[in-house]
Amino acid sequence: MITALAIMALGAVVLGAALGYASIRFKVEGDPLVEKIEAILPQTQCGQCGYPGCKPYAAAISAGEADINLCPPGGMDGVRKLADLLGREVKALEAEEKPKQVAIIDEATCIGCTLCIQACPVDAIVGAAKQMHTIIEPLCTGCELCIKPCPVECIHMLPITENLDNWKWKYPVIEIKRAA
Amino acid sequence: MLAQLFGFKGGVKPQTNKAPSVQLPIGQAPLPSCLFVPLHQNIGGAPNPLVVVGEHVLKGQLIGGADGWVSAAVHAPTSGTVLAIEEHVAAHPSGLPTLSVVIEPDGRDQWIPRTALDHRSLAPERVREILRDAGVVGLGGAAFPSHAKLTPARAVPMQDLVINGAECEPFMTCDDLLMRERAEEIVRGIAIFRDLLGAKRVLIGIEDNKPEAISAMNKAVLRLAEDYAVVAVPTRYPAGGAKQLIRVLTGKEVPASKRSTELGVQCFNVATVYTAYRALAHGEPVISRIVTLTGNIEQPRNWEVRLGTPMRELIALGRPKADTDRYLMGGPMMGFEIPDLAAPVVKATNCLIAGSPALFPASPPEMPCIRCGACAEVCPHELQPFELYWFSRARNFGKTQEYHIFDCIECGCCSYVCPSHIPLVQYFRFAKSEIWSREREKQAADAAKARFELRNAREEREQAEKAERLAKAAAARGSERKPAPASAAVLPPTVEPVQPVAAAESAEAVSPSDPDTVRKATIVAAMERARAQREAVKPRNTEQLTVEQKNEIAAIEARRAALKPEPAAAQGGRADSATSQERPGE
Ligand code: SF4
Ligand code: SF4
Ligand code: SF4
Ligand code: SF4
């Protein structure tokens, strides 16, 4: 009886020590869940979720403060992935899903005020004071944050059209033909 | 001769249907009314246009310069006038447009000056460059720039050079005819590739249903006293897949994750070798290719066709029968249906097949997979197509990758045998392009995140620096104010949000030692520094400009020269245009 107790006690001590050591030795920096959530978010950094960027939203989801259906650029696909990761219910998106877009500056109208440069979260706009500005299309995430600040309303959003570089094979559908 | 052939797993034996198109020798297709030469005909970087609208070009003139190393140049297929550089429908299953140079032939077909070179007298790097600038790409259908495959791996000595004349795809006979009629040039071309790679052994693999080609190649090898082995490989689709042929001839298995040079073997198509030889020994860039025109037409035949010829004009030469309802580019196994016959013949167009309901009966409706395993038996890559199908269908792309979807060469054997008529390859193409597009999106998202974080860090740093500067200015003002109590009375010592300029001014107001000259001197010094900086900056990315960009720059330079007498204006102008020039490339 005593031996059994002693063995169990010894086991508890040894395992406890091992666990304690492991928690110090293999300490994880940052919050791995936030990182996993952030990896799913589209990094548009548009703030439409009500948080100032994708990371704050990820932190809010992980803390249980925010729902998983607030990110319009992520679309239903994003909601599904988040639901998968977190084991929550799939919910309908809060807003409408939009096609992917990029911003374009009407270069003739641009007065070079630099306001859009300051608004762009991903440094996708180049230009200098009183010089024409332009958007580096491949870097633009389509967040629309540069539209409002422009005093002469020369920035528009264009949907990304299909071209040979982004063309995809479609899901095979079987044509239903009318029987003759 | 090789002592032993190695087999590959799987494969099927579809009806070859090759006989009709080998009755006639290769014909020269007449000049079309108009040529639409797409600039991007290769895998890799898209070439830049080097001509302008209205320019007269000669046959073989460079019209698109290679962009980067993995890219290949594009040339004018005949002499004539550039009518437009515009988007024109591409030879692609989507029917989407691509930037093309439209050339109206002048009928004279006048060559550029050509120089014949001997590859043995040139450095290997130079030969690769010549091949790139002659637009030599894999003509088997992949259109991968050949020069980029011609660098041997450092660690592994190049053992075998495999020359692919197998041509396993049904209907297709362009390589067969090329070997029959131009064997000697192919054999001479092989020497170029062998020397560049330093290959010890050359194996020419030809399917045993082409005895004429085998004997022609054998004769040419003998005549030129080379030690190449011409090997007849058993006829079984897809023996002409690069990986299958390598496996059959050398026994080496090339995994999807590795390049074949890493295993000491490389593979080229016979037509590619032929164009490489024409490029070096005759100075002729790739401006035409042999295309098999066959199927439901009156006169099946192989034609030597100028690149950029609209498919409609080529097809008219074969006189399609009335019940033709579709056209395929490539073979019936791996090809695709052309949505628009205005699309031009490109370097990847090896075969055009006119299809009719009788020739390609509509496949019966798709039925559920019965897990018979027939597809797995014929898959030359020993994949499990039914598993891949299941996961592609369910859009479970992670799983498809676990089942090695990227090892699939889309040969179509699995769809061919499936008793449930499942278009398996279509599911695999869908899954692959979906995975690629997600990969692209992921990369873009990661880049956006990195830029966002950099920007945040920069803003924080700038704010901290500003605060520090202000604190310093305030401190400086505070210490200087002590000997002058008059101004201290006006400004309290702890004012923070003051512009540094204001601080400097107040500092000057306090120290009366000739403020004007000091200030002027600093301004002059600052202007001098700025000027020096401006002059040190050279506009970069000025190589590889299009003609239009060059003209634009010349116009700007001219305007700038006109402004020269007024130095201040000229300097301002230079700074501006320097920024605007650097912008597009950034
Ligand atoms: S809405 Fe989506 S993309 Fe926009 S900031 Fe929020 S998480 Fe990021
Ligand atoms: S350019 Fe405009 S739309 Fe594009 S990322 Fe920047 S702020 Fe957003
Ligand atoms: S051949 Fe067709 S039915 Fe048979 S296992 Fe493969 S996919 Fe399923
Ligand atoms: S198409 Fe892909 S999966 Fe099907 S047999 Fe060919 S390699 Fe195998």
Image: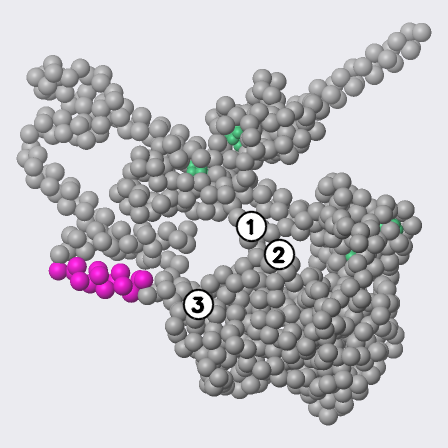
Q: Chain of mark 3?
A: B
**Label 2 near label 1: C-beta < 8 Å?**
yes
- Residue A134, percent from left and from top: 37, 46
Instruction: Indicate how the structure is coloured in the image.
Output: one colour
The label on residue A162 is 1
Query: Badge 2: how crowded within 10 Å, few (<14), some, or many (20+)?
Result: many
- Give the vertical position of A21 relative to B198 (above or below): above
The label on residue B83 is none
Element under label 2? Answer: loop
**Label 2 near label 3: C-beta < 8 Å?**
no
Label 3 beta carbon less than 8 Å to ligand 2:
no
Query: Badge 3: how crowded within 10 Å, few (<14), some, or many (20+)?
Result: some
Residue at the spot of label 3: B84
On the same chain, marks 1 and 2? The answer is no
In the image, the segment drawn in magenta is B552-565
Amino acid marked by disc 3: Ala
Question: Label 1 vs label 3: CA separation?
Answer: 23 Å
Question: Label 1 vs label 2: CA separation?
Answer: 10 Å
| Residue B190 visible to an observer of this rendering | no
* Occupied quadrant, residue B342: bottom right
On the same chain, marks 3 and 2? The answer is yes
Principal SS element in the magenta part? helix
| Residue A152 visible to an observer of this rendering | yes
Identify the residue at the far front of this view. Answer: A180
The label on residue B94 is 2
- Residue B211, percent from left and from top: 82, 83
Amino acid marked by disc 2: Ser
- Give the vertical position of B417 relative to B14 (above or below): above
* Residue occupying the point 20% across, 63% down: B561
In this image, B341 relative to B160: left or right? left
* Residue occupying the point 44% across, 35% down: A144
